Image (cartoon, grey):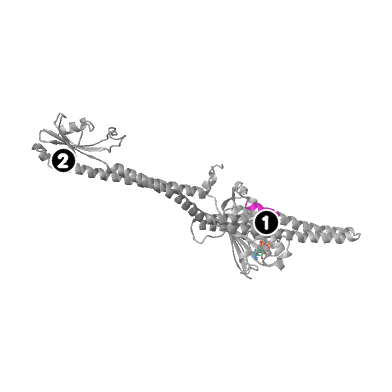
């Protein structure tokens, strides 16, 4: 059977209340019975103390309101007053104790008295056996009916039954109401969550006024929604940006081809057009390539193919191949100072792309005659690589945004630049992150920029371990 939380809470509440009522009644009954019996026992001892002297002097007691009888040590009854021998047996245990000179207390349960009218229940009898004289010459037995204990039991039973009969429905109702009240915020949250979908991701769950467990749950879920909404907006903007950047080269191609198709053209004209179209195709495929790379860069699958590799070697190769280009094409001085033996766990192609993007930017945003310097060293388990230029620098307003996808600081200038989509630094950052590293920038407008990448290094010991 499937019970709702509200039903379960009510059930538990009622059961616990019932159990406590019964336990409470039990404690009162046993405690009360013990107290009552103690009272009876004391009374019996008192009576025995009163009776003993008169009986040993073979005198009859003056006035006794307690039943008693006098026995010989062998159990023969000498005298009985109110303790009928036939109905109240002399137990061997009491007799044996008395012969040994010890007092003995016992409870004797009598059968129903059938000789009276109908069958009447007789209360249990408490009997005290006292040896008299040393050595024992007589045995005194005093007895008292424990009438109060059965009375207490029935009183408690009736009270308990009434309490249960009246209290339980009330408790169940109260429990139902309380559980409903406590669960109200949950219902509100469920309704709000049902309303939230991709179109209204800005809506949030109602936050209960107190900062209790439900308040914290709502806060946590709202935090999750915040992140989801941000991710969703980022993806949406990304798609819009990609589409926009794809449209421009496609429109250029379309119009170039359209113009050529208008009328017959010479082979020379056609060639020129094809070169232009080829250029635009490069643009499109470059953009698609970058987009694809970004969408895969944070895939966990990639991390599994990481292998320990020599970062020093990778950087040295990169500097050596780009320096001639920087020198010839841009009149820039590109130098490297890389410590040997920097080893990181990673993917060669991705890391090449990361540093190539940084070098590409450095060359692009540094005027002819500038200098670009790549330095690599190891600090506390990290390989730190800095790519510094003395180029145009980045304005403080742009600095926080340059790692965002499609962000270009100087839109007018870089928009026309080939291969500039505003994705280079996003890719660099994504690669650094999958490698467990970080990328940061320090820049001053007109003075230059320094991009610093830190990646965790692998210790030679870790490398020697066989790969699973
Ligand atoms: P882009 O494809 O436009 O280079 P990036 O993501 O690589 O895109 O860079 C984002 C922006 O950051 C660039 O448009 C540029 O304004 C700025 N930037 C990046 N690197 C440098 C640098 N070394 N010097 C000056 N500005 C830079």
- Asked whether residue 385 is in view, the answer is no
Q: Nearer the viewer, residue 113 or 160?
A: 113
Q: Helix or strand or loop: what does disc 2 sit on?
A: helix
Give the number of callouts: 2
Magenta highlight range: 289-298
Furthest residue toward right: 264
- What whole-number distance in Å separates the C-alpha atoms at marks 1 and 2? 120 Å
Q: Which is nearer the N-term, disc 1 or disc 2?
A: 2
Indicate whether residue 407 is drawn in magenta.
no
- The reply to whether the C-beta atoms of the residues labelled 1 and 2 are less than 8 Å apart is no
> Residue tagged by mark 2?
48
Furthest residue toward bottom: 446
Furthest residue toward front: 117
Q: Residue sitting at 30 percent across and 35 percent down?
A: 117
Query: Residue 340 location, x and y as percent?
Result: 57, 54
Query: Residue 10 location, x and y as percent?
Result: 48, 49
Query: Residue 253 location, x and y as percent?
Result: 81, 59
- Asked whether residue 421 is in view, the answer is yes
Q: Nearer the viewer, residue 41 or 314?
A: 41
Marker disc for residue 321: 1
Q: Helix or strand or loop: what does disc 1 sit on?
A: helix
Query: Residue 204 location, x and y as percent?
Result: 59, 60
The rendered magenta stretch, by its main secondary structure, is classed as helix
Q: Residue sitting at 68 percent across and 67 percent down?
A: 410
Q: Is residue 250 left or right of residue 401?
A: right
């Amino acid at each position: 059977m499937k019970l709702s939380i509200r039903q379960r809470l009510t059930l538990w509440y009622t059961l616990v209340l019932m159990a406590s009522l019964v336990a409470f009644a039990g404690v009162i009954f046993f405690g009360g019975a013990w107290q009552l019996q103690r009272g009876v026992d004391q009374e019996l001892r008192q009576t025995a103390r009163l009776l003993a002297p008169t009986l040993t002097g073979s005198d009859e007691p003056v006035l006794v309101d307690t039943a008693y009888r006098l026995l010989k040590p062998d159990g023969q009854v000498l005298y009985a007053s109110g303790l009928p021998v036939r109905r109240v047996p002399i137990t061997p245990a009491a007799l044996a104790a008395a012969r040994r000179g010890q007092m003995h207390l016992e409870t004797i349960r009598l059968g129903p008295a059938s000789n009276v009218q109908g069958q009447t229940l007789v209360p249990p009898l408490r009997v005290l056996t006292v040896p008299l004289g040393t050595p024992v010459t007589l045995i005194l037995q005093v007895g008292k009916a424990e009438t109060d204990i059965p009375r207490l039991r029935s009183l408690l039973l009736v009270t308990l039954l009434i309490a249960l009969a009246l209290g339980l429905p009330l408790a169940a109702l109260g429990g139902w109401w309380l559980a409903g009240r406590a669960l109200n915020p949950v219902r509100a949250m469920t309704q709000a969550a049902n309303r939230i979908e991709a179109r209204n991701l800005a809506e949030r769950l109602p936050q209960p006024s107190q900062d209790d467990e439900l308040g914290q749950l709502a806060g946590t879920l709202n935090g999750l929604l915040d992140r989801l909404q941000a991710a969703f907006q980022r993806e949406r903007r990304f798609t819009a940006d990609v589409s926009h950047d794809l449209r421009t080269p496609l429109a250029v191609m379309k119009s170039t081809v359209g113009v050529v198709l208008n009328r017959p053209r010479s082979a020379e004209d056609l060639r020129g057009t094809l070169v232009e179209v080829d250029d635009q195709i490069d643009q499109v495929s470059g953009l698609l390539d970058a987009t694809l790379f970004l969408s895969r860069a944070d895939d966990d699958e990639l991390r599994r193919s990481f292998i320990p590799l020599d970062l020093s070697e990778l950087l040295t190769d990169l500097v050596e191949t780009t320096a001639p280009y920087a020198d010839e094409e841009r009149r820039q001085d590109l130098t490297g100072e890389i410590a040997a033996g920097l080893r990181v766990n990673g993917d060669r192609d991705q890391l090449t792309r990361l540093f190539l993007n940084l070098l590409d930017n450095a060359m692009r945003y540094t005027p002819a005659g500038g200098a670009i310097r790549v330095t690599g060293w190891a600090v506390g388990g990290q390989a730190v690589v800095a790519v510094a230029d003395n180029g145009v620098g980045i304005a403080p307003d742009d600095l926080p945004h340059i790692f965002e996808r499609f962000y270009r600081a100087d839109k007018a200038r870089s928009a026309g630049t080939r291969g500039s989509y505003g994705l280079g630094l996003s890719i660099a950052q994504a690669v650094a992150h999958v490698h467990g590293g970080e990328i940061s920038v320090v820049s001053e407008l007109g003075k230059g920029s320094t991009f610093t990448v830190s990646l965790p290094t692998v210790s030679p010991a870790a490398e020697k371990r066989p790969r699973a």
